[in-house]
């Protein structure tokens, strides 16, 4: 998928190279400030390119976010593992780059996606090395608990052969599609799934087993998809286990599909019962971890939705989603919650509880201008038709992004047709189906952060998207109703800090 992010023309304004100290990272961030589009409270790379979250962990009390990073420019190439740390999931500090491709060896083209493993107290990561037409499983161990310095295993690459009869997909680019890692332990034995595809069938998560994390034996596909539904190749597969079942999610180049069902520890088979999408927007290649409070926290890559030349000019590309607390209800429904820590970002609060809007009308919320906002609202869906929230609106209405809720059709659409005057951006609408709460309430939770908009409906559906207003006065907020009165039971808006 990354081939489409080719470099633009001309000089990159970013300082290419490998900053080492905190001051250098701060300088780099200032060099590519981009205040209209660069998110204030979502994590973005210091400069240049970011894609997948990797190696997520809370280690020794601190949260670590590693990520696919190209320090040489805002395009996908020579991937390293960037690194940031946080005490609260909200404020992130840049750390020196954690993993570099070697000049020669199994990761000479790039250090691609992988996960964190606690090997009896030794912080360890499994990642994919890119070398020529090969994608090779590799391992590295941290030299200390700061997770700054890593030593790659001399045994790399760890998987040399897979039985021929598995029929792994080959493409013009790769001898076999075989990458990205999710590792766990059961009764002292290690297991992992690796993303792949089976020729003529579809994407696959291949299960391997090991006693020591170094020698891996192939077992079977934990799940294979139908290429017509979820593509010929799965990237970044992840198995999440909860009290009432398991979720296996996979990224298929365009979307993140999940299967909810049962994982059987005795057979090591996964039985899917329901399926859906983790997000209906640009959220991609997510990864999760369980923190010290037992929360399953998921981050995803929010892809850019503007062309390569604009990314080149901006000097940075890619944002990380907010962390989402993922859970599974007894009936197998996926639930999202936003961690309480995010509330520390809130500053000014405005409440419009009880506000009513008549059909065909709109109300400008004149004292809540901003490009970094949290909006939370509930309506009684029984008497409500279509209504919406307009964000990043200019006073003359020329630029505006509309979050449109069609309650009868049970859908939320982010209409980006007027989000930006630029023709270098994708202005296509993005939409998601919604379900209502048992009592018929629809609740919406929006996080606006300059070029990022994350929308959650009834804590069950999510849509993260990107918008690129061009004007400095694209900061207005309004609400409207189309065909019925709309009465907001609650409507809270907060300005959010950086
Ligand atoms: C997903 C992905 C992974 C790969 C990495 C390379 O976005 O393509 O499959 O490991 O990115 O950067």
Image (cartoon, rainbow, N blue to C red):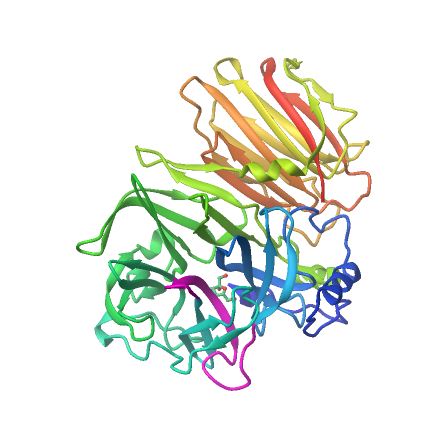
**285 or 20: nearer the viewer:** 20
Measured along the vertical axis of the image, is residue 294 above or below residue 72? Answer: above
Seen in the image, is 5 located left or right of residue 218?
Answer: right
Q: Residue 194 location, x and y as percent?
A: 35, 64
Measured along the vertical axis of the image, is residue 373 above or below residue 222? Answer: above
Q: Residue 79 location, x and y as percent?
A: 56, 71
Q: Is residue 219 something that shows in the picture?
A: yes
Q: Residue 369 location, x and y as percent?
A: 77, 32
Residue 178 in magenta stretch: no
Residue in the image at 33% along x and 74% along y = 214
User: Image quadrant of residue 188?
Assistant: bottom left
Of all residues, the one furthest to the left in this rendering is 266
User: Image quadrant of residue 493?
Assistant: top right
Residue in the image at 75% along x and 67% along y = 24
**327 or 452: nearer the viewer:** 327
**Quick one: quadrant of the C terminus?**
top right
Residue 102 in magenta stretch: yes
Magenta region? 99-122
Q: Is residue 385 something that shows in the picture?
A: no
Of all residues, the one furthest to the bottom in this rendering is 104
Q: How many marks?
A: 0
Q: Residue 122 location, x and y as percent?
A: 42, 67
């Amino acid at each position: 998928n990354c081939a489409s992010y080719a470099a633009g023309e001309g000089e990159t304004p970013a300082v290419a190279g490998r900053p080492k100290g905190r001051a250098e990272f701060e300088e780099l961030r200032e060099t590519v400030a981009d205040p209209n589009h660069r998110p204030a409270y979502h994590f973005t790379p210091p400069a240049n390119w970011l894609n997948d979250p990797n190696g997520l962990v809370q280690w020794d009390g601190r949260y670590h976010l590693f990520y696919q990073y190209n320090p040489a420019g805002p395009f996908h190439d020579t991937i390293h593992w960037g690194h940031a740390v946080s005490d609260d999931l909200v404020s992130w500090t840049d750390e020196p780059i954690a993993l570099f491709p070697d000049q020669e060896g199994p990761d000479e083209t790039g250090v691609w996606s992988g996960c964190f493993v606690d090997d009896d107290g030794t912080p360890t990561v499994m990642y994919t090395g890119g070398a020529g037409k090969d994608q090779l499983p590799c391992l590295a161990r941290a030299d200390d608990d700061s997770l700054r310095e890593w030593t790659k295993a001399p045994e790399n690459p760890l998987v040399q052969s897979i039985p021929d009869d598995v029929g792994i997909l080959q493409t013009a680019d790769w001898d076999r599609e075989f990458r990205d890692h999710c590792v766990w332990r059961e009764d002292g034995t290690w297991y992992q799934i690796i993303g792949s595809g089976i020729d003529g069938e579809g994407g696959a998560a291949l299960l391997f087993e090991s006693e020591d994390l170094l020698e891996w034996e192939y077992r079977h596909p934990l799940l294979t998809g139908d290429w017509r539904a979820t593509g010929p190749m799965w990237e970044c597969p992840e198995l999440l286990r909860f009290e009432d079942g398991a979720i296996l999610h996979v990224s298929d180049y365009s979307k993140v599909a999940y299967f909810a069902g049962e994982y059987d520890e005795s057979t090591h088979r996964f039985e899917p019962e329901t399926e859906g999408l983790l997000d209906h927007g640009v959220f991609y290649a997510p990864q999760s971890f369980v923190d010290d409070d037992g929360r399953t926290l998921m981050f995803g890559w929010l892809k850019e939705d503007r062309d390569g030349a604009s990314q080149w000019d901006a000097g940075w590309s890619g944002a990380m989603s907010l962390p989402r607390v993922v859970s599974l209800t007894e009936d197998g429904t996926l639930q999202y919650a936003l961690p309480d820590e995010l509330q520390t970002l809130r500053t000014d609060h405005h409440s419009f509880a009880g506000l009513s809007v008549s059909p065909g009308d709109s109300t400008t919320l004149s004292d809540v201008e901003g490009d970094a906002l949290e909006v939370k609202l509930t309506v009684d869906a029984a008497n409500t038709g279509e209504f919406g929230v307009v964000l990043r609106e200019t006073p003359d209405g020329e630029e505006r992004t509309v979050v449109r809720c069609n309650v009868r059709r049970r859908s939320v659409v982010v209409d980006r047709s007027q989000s930006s005057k630029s023709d270098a951006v994708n202005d296509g609408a993005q939409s998601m189906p919604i379900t209502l709460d048992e009592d018929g309430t629809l609740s919406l939770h929006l996080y606006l952060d300059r070029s990022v908009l994350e929308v959650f409906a009834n804590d069950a559906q999510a849509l993260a998207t990107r918008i690129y207003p061009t004007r400095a006065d694209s900061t207005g907020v309004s609400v409207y109703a189309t065909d019925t009165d709309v009465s907001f039971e609650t409507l809270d808006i907060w300005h959010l800090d950086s």
